């Protein structure tokens, strides 16, 4: 991280539609062991751990960041592996931005997915994403990626560097209000999450 | 434009690698008549106007914006047609953000281009962009797209909604310090712009 003046060098990136980003400055992996409590079907989750091991990769984030503070951006890729836990499709943890009015772009580079979006006052949207499709997530929307396909679901993202992520919000609420599940006919549908207790007050 | 709460609906976009963006909320075209004084070779510019007419399209911007203010984003596409004015390749007007610490992402979707970047204290960079390549432009960098190919040069961009653009800065300085020109061997190179008088003080 550097101060705004003098500005750092431009970041030169090469973004593979498979999710790799040459020029990245940071990133992380989330494995099955990191996803405890995320999926509603605990038995299916335990079976996945037993079958694939706790170190099985669920998703990878690679990003490029060079300046802190208002007006700076974080640019990166999210690569979510395909998977199923009972009838629920593989998801990222999901978040509201810690500065909740911060927006985000997700642009699908490969695979087939859904961006699941919810407001604290009860709106819910599920936006299908295939290569070339994008979603402009305004501030104040909780959001999570879902892989409904059989290949990795890859998105390019861009958001304000001072946004931060509130990951606890979803866990404290018993998960998001909606689930993206198998519709029994080779597609996907939404279903209300019976464990959802409503989002924490004041998070917006 | 809407206020931050309640937040607007997520923007659902379809981005064509040829530059069209379904779901856009605004945009504009720049034609030869809008580019007077931008190219250094006034004779070549006049010849282009005589040959193609003042309404000949130079570039098109399509964008999606839904919230004003800090933390919001503007997402869009820039489609710069190929062209030559003397040995200088087709360019956009270029800008420094009016709030000069605001950053920007450019991700190349098709064509062959260069992002020309300069700081007010004399640094200059030319970043080649082909599909999959991207540049993370930190705040305080003047930047302009250049089409060095024979097809439209298309980028996806994303920047803070409160950034604004200072277009006058480059015009007042007699153009950017560097030009992107034909190298005489089928490629491109940079050449110092003899008309450049230095950027206005205090613009950063």
Image (spheres, coloured by chain):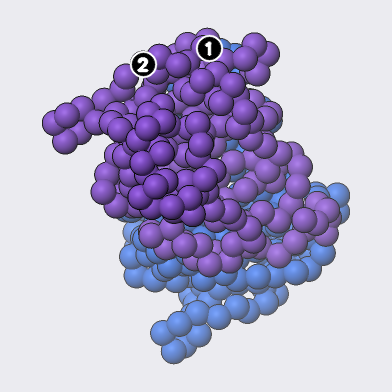
Chain colours: A purple, B blue
Tags 2 and 1 both on a single chain = yes
Q: Is residue A48 above or below residue A171?
A: below
Q: CA distance from mark 2 to mark 1?
A: 12 Å
Name the residue nearer the viewer: B135 or A59: A59
x, y (%) of residue B190?
A: 60, 78
Sequence-first tag of 2 and 1: 2
Chain at tag 2: A
User: Residue B171: in sight, yes or no?
Assistant: no
- The residue drawn where x is 83% and y is 53% is A3
Quadrant placement of the N terminus of chain B? top right
Identify residue for label 2: A192
Name the residue nearer the viewer: A48 or A154: A48
Chain at tag 1: A
Name the residue nearer the viewer: B2 or B188: B2
Query: Image check: B140 left or right of B128?
Result: right
- Within 10 angstroms of label 1, few (less than 14), some, or many (20 or more) residues? some
Identify residue for label 1: A198
x, y (%) of residue B45?
A: 48, 64
- The residue drawn where x is 38% and y is 60% is A18
- The residue drawn where x is 55% and y is 25% is A170
Q: Helix, strand, or loop for circle 2?
A: strand
């Amino acid at each position: 991280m550097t101060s705004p003046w003098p500005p750092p060098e431009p970041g030169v990136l090469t973004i593979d539609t498979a999710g790799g980003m040459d020029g990245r400055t940071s990133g992380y992996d989330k494995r099955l062991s990191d996803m405890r409590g995320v999926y509603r079907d605990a038995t299916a989750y335990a079976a996945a751990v037993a079958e694939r091991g706790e170190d099985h990769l669920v998703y990878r984030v690679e990003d490029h960041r060079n300046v802190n503070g208002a007006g700076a951006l974080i640019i990166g890729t999210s690569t979510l592996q395909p998977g199923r836990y009972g009838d629920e499709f593989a998801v990222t943890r999901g978040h509201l931005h810690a500065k909740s009015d911060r927006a985000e772009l997700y642009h699908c580079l490969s695979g087939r997915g859904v961006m699941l979006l919810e407001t604290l006052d009860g709106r819910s949207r599920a936006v299908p994403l295939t290569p070339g499709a994008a979603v402009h997530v305004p501030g104040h929307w909780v959001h999570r990626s879902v892989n409904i396909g059989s290949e990795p679901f890859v998105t390019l993202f861009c958001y304000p560097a001072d946004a931060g992520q509130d990951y606890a919000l979803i866990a404290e609420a018993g998960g998001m209000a909606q689930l993206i599940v198998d519709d029994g006919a080779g597609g996907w549908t939404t279903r209300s999450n019976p464990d959802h207790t409503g989002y924490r007050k004041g998070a917006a």
